[in-house]
């Protein structure tokens, strides 16, 4: 209970107005979370009129680096074993070595490399070590872009993934599960949950039901915000300072939703291509799941429903087995290979599987003609991990691959070898600038990455 309050607020308390109800976030005056609550969870010179898009994909637990890193810098010639899965797209790739994520390191916080690896990947900010509600990270590059240019599309950004994750509880050495499962952060205290159900992703992109249904649903959602405002003012006056700040932030998020609803209503809903099958549920087959979400990501870019996306292929520290490629052990367990050659080979097998899925996404992007080039020509699609070698839990020389020419602003078909300890956020800063988002600083960046355009 907040020491400035003399009363305890029920966890089930809601803001109510004219029959509308909005559940409150957890506040200090509600007391500590109970165990059951924690368990809830073409060509470089492509058409200049095409918008630039940006997507970041995440693979967990690092990679087997000997099968990832090319022998030399410069032009991509013979690809190493893992990247050989991308040979058809070689001229569209920029492999970058030497990038580091310092804020994924302990820096005095002890264990928790997996939680830090994902939460710091797009933020460059050290997450607060907590398994409670007082999480804190940093705004992620995708949300910086969304805040600046997201009003140009129906959806400011799209967050998807293949593995559900809890938003509370301890998942890694005292770090909240939210850190291990969430890639996108709207603010230092507002993680943006990913959607794993392809049907819901489809409905978000294309809308659901009749036009009248959507108008009525949006009207009611918007009116709820108006209905509860007076109740909010009354309640806010009874709370301590920290709870007031949290509730202010919560209502700000609701207001943000109101703006997004209004913006979405100002755009006509795009139509999916003829013959596209609307997914009903999340597939149990992992490859099918990845490819279905990849198709939806391509459709979101193709219809200009959004220009910014994040895609978590599996949560950091994931112990998912891969029996369909004859890897029955858990991924995380294998990543602690202790230099065992058999385990390293299985890790490399998992890495190749993920690269095959990335090749599928790139193929789909290249199949869409746009202006004088393809959709991929007008994209910047990064894939990588916040760990390098999962056995060492090191966060230097990260496996980072960038695909697409960013409307002719990126020179591909190369291996760009940077000095060691170059901040990963320098790369993200470079991508932001190519989205016409001029930002001098992002997390621990030290300046825009040089060398993206040769």
Image: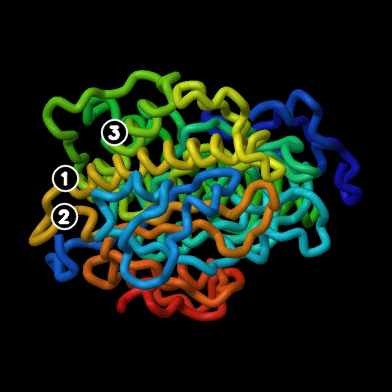
Q: Which residue occupies 36% across, 55% down?
A: 79
189, above or below 194, in the image: below
**Would you say residue 450 is visible in this rendering?**
yes
Q: Residues within 10 Å of mark 1 (few under 14, many from 20)?
A: few
- The percent position of residue 38, horizontal first and vertical second, equals 73, 31
Give the mark, 1 or 2, whose residue is nearer the N terminus.
1
Give the mark, 3 or 1, whose residue is nearer the N terminus.
3
Pointer 3 residue: 207
**Observer-nearest of 20 and 34:** 34
- The percent position of residue 288, horizontal first and vertical second, equals 36, 26
- Closer to viewer: mark 3 or mark 2: 2
Pointer 2 residue: 374
Q: Which residue occupies 22% across, 70% down?
A: 408
**Would you say residue 27 is visible in this rendering?**
no
**Observer-nearest of 28 and 197:** 197
Pointer 1 residue: 367
Work out which residue is located at the far left of the displayed protein and give it.
372
Indicate the quadrant where residue 374 lies. bottom left
430, above or below 294, in the image: below
Contact? badges 1 and 2 (CB < 8 Å):
yes
- The percent position of residue 155, horizontal first and vertical second, equals 34, 48
Apparent side of residue 167 relative to residue 284 in the rendered image (left or right): right
Q: Residues within 10 Å of mark 3 (few under 14, many from 20)?
A: some
SS at mark 1? Answer: helix
């Amino acid at each position: 209970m907040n020491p400035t309050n003399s009363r305890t607020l029920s966890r089930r308390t809601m803001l109510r107005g004219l029959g509308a109800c909005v559940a409150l976030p957890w506040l200090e005056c509600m007391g500590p979370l109970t165990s059951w609550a924690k368990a809830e969870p073409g060509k470089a010179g492509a058409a200049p009129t095409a918008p630039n898009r940006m997507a970041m994909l995440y693979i967990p637990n690092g990679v087997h680096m000997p099968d990832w890193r090319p022998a030399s810098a410069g032009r991509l010639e013979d690809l190493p074993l893992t990247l050989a899965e991308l040979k058809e797209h070689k001229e569209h790739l920029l492999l970058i070595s030497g990038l580091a994520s310092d804020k994924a390191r302990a820096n005095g916080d002890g264990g928790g490399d997996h939680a830090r690896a994902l939460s710091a990947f797009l933020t460059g900010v050290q997450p607060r070590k907590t398994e409670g509600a007082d999480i804190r990270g940093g705004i992620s590059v995708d949300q910086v872009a969304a805040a600046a240019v997201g009003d140009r599309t129906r959806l400011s950004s799209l967050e998807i993934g293949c593995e559900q994750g809890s938003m509370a509880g301890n998942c890694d050495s005292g770090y909240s599960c939210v850190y291990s499962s969430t890639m996108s952060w709207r603010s230092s205290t507002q993680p943006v949950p990913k959607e794993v159900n392809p049907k819901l992703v489809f409905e978000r992109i294309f809308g659901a039901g009749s036009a009248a249904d959507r108008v009525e649903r949006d009207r009611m959602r918007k009116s709820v915000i108006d209905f509860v405002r007076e109740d909010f003012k009354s309640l806010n006056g009874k709370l301590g300072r920290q709870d007031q700040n949290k509730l202010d932030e919560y209502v700000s998020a609701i207001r943000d939703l109101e703006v997004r609803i209004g913006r979405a209503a100002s755009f006509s809903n795009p139509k999916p291509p003829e013959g596209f099958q609307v997914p009903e549920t999340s597939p149990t087959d992992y490859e099918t799941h990845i490819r279905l979400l990849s198709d939806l990501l391509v459709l979101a870019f193709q219809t200009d429903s959004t220009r910014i996306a994040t895609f978590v292929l599996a949560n950091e520290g994931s112990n998912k087995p891969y029996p369909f490629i004859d890897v029955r052990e858990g991924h995380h367990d294998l990543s602690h290979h202790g230099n065992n050659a058999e385990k390293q080979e299985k890790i490399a097998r998992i890495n190749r599987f993920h690269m095959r899925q990335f090749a599928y996404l790139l193929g789909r992007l290249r199949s869409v003609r746009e202006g004088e080039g393809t959709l991929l020509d007008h994209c910047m699609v990064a894939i990588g991990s916040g760990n390098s070698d999962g056995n060492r839990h090191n966060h230097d020389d990260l496996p980072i691959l960038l695909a697409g020419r960013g409307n002719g602003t990126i020179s591909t078909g190369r291996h760009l070898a940077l000095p060691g300890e170059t901040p990963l956020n320098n790369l993200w800063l470079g991508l932001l600038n190519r989205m016409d988002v001029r930002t001098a600083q992002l997390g621990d960046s030290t300046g825009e990455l040089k060398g993206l355009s040769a």
